Image: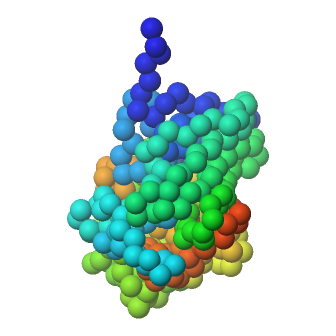
Amino acid sequence: MAESRGPNGRPLELASGHYKAAVYPAGAALGSLTWRNRHLVLPLAPHEIPPAFSGKVLLPWPNRITGGRYVFGGAVHQLPVNEPETGSALHGLVAWQEWAVAESTASRAVLKYRLMGQPGYPFPLDLRATYTLDAEGGLLLELSARNPGTAAAPYGASVHPYLTADGASVDRCVLDVPARRVLGGPDSPGRPLPLGELRDTSGTPLAFHAPEPMAGRSVDHAFTGLPGGEWQVSLTDPATGFGALLTADGSQSPWLQVYSGEKMARRGVAVEPMTCPPDAFNSGENLITLAPGGEHRMACRISAVVPAG
């Protein structure tokens, strides 16, 4: 009898020091990450359809393409619209596909996927997601893409973890985001706005710098004005001092989407380092063009915020 499998595939279990993680072949998704059995991302059960793209990799574009329509290389392309409420093509083409396991060890998992050309995105890509767990540094997530085709391809990348302070309500947690600018205001969450809507975060409800709890504040916005080198976003529970820290590089990820997790009962905050802003396939802002044979890489790290003492 054939082995039964859930919608995420068999998890790849990783461990190093006090850290443990699970990675699923479906969407090369991060299924769990713990430090001393305390959760750093919202966990996914093997038979649970991941809600709100939880843990997924977002390729070959992150966020939204308005109307699913864009022009590239002089040709008009139309993608399926999978977010009816905004009329957008959301989060790429590989989040629900089964990736092949290229390597699996006690602390490292490598998954790969050949994206074939298709209507709306007629560009083949060789994609790779690598998860490496380290006892000191936590979990390193690396994404790479290579264009094996004969024409240049538009490209963007992100990941979609929901950081959590071991399941504590977001309302009592403190979120720290080192971004100086944001697309839109509090009244325009989850919308692929034009770059002309960029505003300063200072003095607005979308400035997450001070040690104030998240109670009463919601966010689903794209941020920029991040440090050009290493930048970090943290979510901590003041009651315990425990939390999660995401570290990325501004040279690779000059944009960041933050979502306060209303679809996840506000138990975690989506922190998505992005190579480009929403609708980059139309604006061209920070859009990566992969020439034939060209490659791109990006990385981020998730680790524990450990209470003093």
Q: Is residue 268 left or right of residue 215?
A: right
Q: Is residue 259 visible?
A: no
Position of residue 271 in the picture relative to residue 108 (left or right): left
Quadrant location of the N terminus? top left
Residue at screen point 57% across, 79% down: 286
Residue 110 quadrant: top right
Q: Residue at x 46, y 49 (%)?
A: 95
Is the image coloured rainbow, by chain, by secondary structure, or in one colour?
A: rainbow
Relative to 272, say whether 130 is above or below. above
Q: Position of residue 223 (x, y in %)?
A: 49, 76
The answer to whether 50 is drawn above or below residue 171 in the figure is above
Q: Residue furthest top?
A: 1
Residue 300 at x, y percent in the picture: 65, 58
Q: Is residue 16 above or below residue 192?
A: above
Q: Residue 83's image quarter?
A: bottom left
Can you name the residue that lies furthest to the left here? 85
Can residue 184 be seen from the camera position used here?
yes
Give how far across and how far down residue 301 sits, in percent: 66, 55
Identify the residue shown where x is 65% and y is 58%. Answer: 148
Residue for point 66% across, 70% down: 291
Give left or right: position of 229 versus 2: right
Depth check, front residue: 161 or 144:
144
Query: Residue 240: image x %, image y %?
Result: 53, 48
Nearer to us in this view, 102 or 30: 102
Name of the residue lying farthest toward the bottom: 196
